[in-house]
Image (spheres, rainbow, N blue to C red):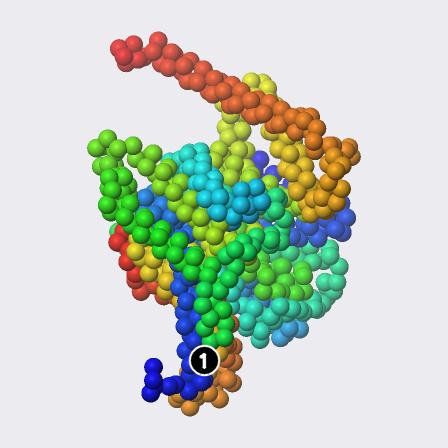
Amino acid sequence: MKTRITLLLMGVAVLLAVPSLVSQGLVNAAIQMLIAALFAAAYSLLCGQAGMLSFGHAAYFGMGSFATVHAMNAMGGSGILPTPLMPLAGAFGGLVFGAVAGYFATKRTGTYFAMITLAIAELVHALSPHLKGTFGGEAGVSTTRMPGWGIAFGSTNEVYYLTLVWVLVSLALLYLFTRTPMGRLTLGLRENVHRLRFLGYNTHGISIAVFALSAMFSGLAGGLQVLNNEAANYLVFDPSLSAAVVLNTYIGGVKVFLGPVLGAALMTFFGYAVSDLTQSWLLYQGTLFVLVMMFMPGGLAGLFSLLGRLYNRFGLQSLIPIVLLAGVSALMFTAGVTFIVEMLQRLFSQDYQAMAHANASMPWPSITLLGKSWSPAAWTTWAVPLTLASVGLVCAVAAKHWLHQLTSREEVAHTAFAKTSSPAGAAQ
Amino acid sequence: MPGLSFPQGVVRAMDAIFVSLMNGIVYGLLLFMVSAGLTLIFGMMGVLNFAHASFYMLGAYFAFALQPLLGFWAAIVVSPLMVAAVGVLVERYFLRRVHQHGHAHELLLTFGLSFIIAELVKLFFGNYPVNYRIPKSLDFSAFTLGGSDYPVYRILMAAIAIAMFVAIYLLLTRTRVGIVVRSAIYRPHMAEALGHNVPLVFMGVFGVGAGLAGLAGAIAGAFYTTNPNMALELGVMVFVVVVVGGLGSLAGAMLASLLIGVITSLAISVDASLADLFALWGARDWAEGVGGLLTLKVSSLSATIPFALMLLILLLRPNGLMGEKA
């Protein structure tokens, strides 16, 4: 527990120090990461803890955005809602819309629930461009951040700290919620609704409350986004936003509280970092998601806790070679696959195709990647990354086998020990 | 008809309604071609396959890519076969692996796959619509109605969809294979106990369902546009169809497809708003004063009507129009 609190305090200290450590562009990226992290945490309250899979959470994020943008325009950053408290308007917007939508959606469970949330999100997405008065049509609604509480909120750093405070407070509240009796009931919704109902709880009511809470924090995240961008557009209802939060949450690991936060922050950061380098970021993100779903349902957080457990059991010495092998194999596999994808992307790009068709008699022009030029007709161009990826794959299988051997050897030792020491074992 | 003549305006209005009714039916039949596979797969495995509309998109893109090599008709035959193969691979190597983790996990996996397929299509074919057109030999009008030509290709699409419905129906109800499939859907464990290879049946139905979606894509992609968003656009509509019709019901899917096709098609041509409805009670001024939803034209609401219908059905008749399994 003590190490956890130390780690947490260190994390907060790093977050506080971010603006003095990195460039303004990165501070802006950090704001996006914080917002995405809060959104994912709010989402995982619903899908991770209550076991209700929503495919339309952009609707609540968007409602929060528009509630905030209208509140900012109406109040001008003064009165009962000064600028630092503006995200409360987003939270309120998310809560109200979430309570209404949640009433309908939680009438059903499982696949039907997922379909209703999808339908509600699509309904809002299809309707919002037509309601120009509320959602501002194609142009959206813009606003200005007014000074409040003696702070100008003119610089990115000030917005960063405002966002940081809101996100940390919300995450703390979301965490404390899991410790309340209501939070325990939320887990009950996931595990066994029938038993909960049998115990006399109003499960529909609890579901609505959890749904509305999740929507409230999503709306708060939306409000923070508006504070940052000073505008809201109907594009916040886009299905891609709903998809991104699902992907982030599961890549991070839905079973651990901070998993989705980690996943969303990492994915947003990578999305920002590689946006100039590749056009296929979404493909990598989707692939990572599918790999996580297939081989590592615990996500990144699950991977860390697995490593922690192995460390406790076998110590550092026997673990290091396996982890190294696994890391190297993952690196080789990623490098090979990424190279192939990037080559294909450039090969099939319109510019290249036009160039190749323009002088069809010439051999295909070569492609520059990683500072070298590669000819698409040469077999080495494809064989090298393919070999790299397959060697990585083989190494990964070997690492898995090795790990399996390690764990099973200990089990054998345990059973052997049990056999010699207990008469029951000897009798078997 | 001699002695009976309508005023010119009425005739024109009736022609317009007839044309949009026809368009709606054709669109509905297309929806059915995609949703048939989806609803069969759901009835069988309990998995709502998020990637199903991606198979539709793959069908269109495969046909587009094969057309220069094989010609239009051969491409339309080969493309669904390729999509069916993709479907079989997805079932065998992806879905079956995660089956133990439950339906939510399977739904998420297919969601991720749909994402990957869309991104791969963008990678190979670009972000913009590709130039997949109907061949010249089919680009003529079947009949002329109210001054506008009705393309023969629409009728062809409808004919293929109907032929497919009849074929599936006969296959499922009249053949031995159909009996095994239906029993595997209805009582998988019992069918397995009687010695049928149920996993193989699942794989086969998944492949056939994917192939049908691919066929729909190969045919419709040439008529409508073929772009990387077509899976998402049609996908949500297909979910609506399957939920409204009743998950797992083929006849329900047919009914719901036609219903939604006709409603959306007719709604586009309605130039009225809810305020006109309120005008019947003399409340037009009030409604126009309220604005917002009440003054929106029905035509601009046409994209939202299916979702509203779906919500209504889920709340009033949760198992859909013809659903049996809850």
B187 sits left or right of A82 in the view: left
Residue that extends furthest to the front in the rendered view of this protein: B2
Quadrant where the N terminus of chain B is found in the figure = bottom left
In the image, residue B285 above or below residue A165 = below
Residue picked out by circle 1: B12
- Image coords of residue A126 (percent x, y): 51, 65
> Amino acid type of disc 1?
Arg
Q: Residue at x 47, y 17 (%)?
A: A405
Q: Quadrant of residue A358?
A: top right
In the image, residue A368 above or below residue A332 = below
A376 sits left or right of B186 in the view: right
Q: Residue at x 36, y 51 (%)?
A: B164
The chain letter under disc 1 is B
- Image coords of residue A351 (percent x, y): 72, 47
- Image coords of residue B293 (percent x, y): 49, 76
Which sits in the foreground, A173 or B104?
Answer: B104
The kind of secondary structure element at disc 1 is helix
Q: Residue at x 51, y 62 (%)?
A: B140
Q: Quadrant of residue B69?
A: top right
